[in-house]
């Protein structure tokens, strides 16, 4: 009977550990939201490199005046080859005036077939959505769109 009690206790502790990461000091989330000014974020992403105007290869489908800033759809399609030796390796979506300006950073491989991303972004006020696309060779493309927010989504 002692073995059965031990197994039940171990299973219960493991379950509690998975359900309560704070108690056991581990995180199940991929990345924590960090408050960082837009200028610092863009400098960190560029790492001293110059961004090329990406408006010729990037299509940004973002409403100019969304109904609610809590849910602003951002759709990015990048017309770029996705070959094993030449492809888009990362797409990052930033906002310019939120408390947390990095909306998402998404890594890609040639197996994705195309460079495409759809995400809903919270926006607290009128600002720009900036999309950065990095190739596997280190070239960075940048495109942006101004979004007028009447009802803010960030508090």
Image: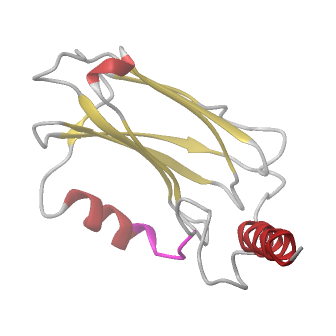
What range is drawn magenta here?
33-38
Q: Left or right of 79: which side holds 154?
A: right
The one of 11 and 76 positioned closer to us in this rendering: 11
Q: Which quarter of the rendering shows the C terminus?
A: bottom right
Compared with 111, 45 (above or below) is below
Mark yes or no: residue 117 visible.
Answer: yes
The one of 150 and 135 positioned closer to us in this rendering: 135
Q: Position of residue 107 (x, y in %)?
A: 37, 40
Q: Left or right of 24: which side holds 96?
A: left
Q: Residue at x 26, y 66 (%)?
A: 43
Q: Residue at x 18, y 16 (%)?
A: 83
Mark yes or no: residue 114 visible.
Answer: no
Compared with 9, 29 (above or below) is above
Please tell me whether residue 37 belongs to the stretch shown in magenta. yes
Q: Position of residue 67 (x, y in %)?
A: 84, 39
- Residue 78, by quadrant, is top left
Please give the count of numbered marks on the rendered protein. 0
Q: Position of residue 77 (x, y in %)?
A: 44, 21
- Its colouring scheme is secondary structure
Please tell me whether residue 31 belongs to the stretch shown in magenta. no
Q: Left or right of 2: which side holds 27?
A: left
Q: Position of residue 9 (x, y in %)?
A: 82, 76
Compared with 148, 108 (above or below) is above
Q: Main secondary structure of the magenta part?
A: loop
Q: Left or right of 74: which side holds 117?
A: left
| Residue placed furthest toward the front | 1
Q: Which quarter of the rendering shows the N terminus?
A: bottom right
Q: Residue at x 57, y 69 (%)?
A: 33
The one of 144 and 47 positioned closer to us in this rendering: 47
């Amino acid at each position: 009977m002692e073995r059965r009690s031990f197994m039940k206790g171990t299973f219960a502790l493991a379950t509690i550990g998975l359900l309560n990461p704070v108690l056991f000091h581990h995180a199940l989330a991929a990345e924590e939201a960090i408050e960082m000014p837009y200028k610092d974020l863009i400098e960190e992403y560029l790492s001293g490199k110059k961004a090329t105007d990406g408006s010729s290869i990037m299509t940004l489908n973002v409403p100019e005046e969304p109904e609610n800033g809590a849910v602003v759809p951002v759709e990015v399609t990048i017309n770029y080859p996705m070959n094993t030796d030449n492809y888009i390796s990362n797409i990052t979506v930033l906002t310019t005036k939120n408390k947390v300006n990095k909306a998402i950073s998404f890594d890609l491989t040639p197996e994705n077939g195309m460079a495409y991303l759809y995400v809903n972004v919270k926006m607290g006020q009128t600002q720009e959505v900036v999309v950065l696309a990095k190739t596997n060779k280190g070239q960075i493309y940048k495109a942006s769109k101004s979004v007028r927010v009447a009802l803010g989504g960030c508090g």
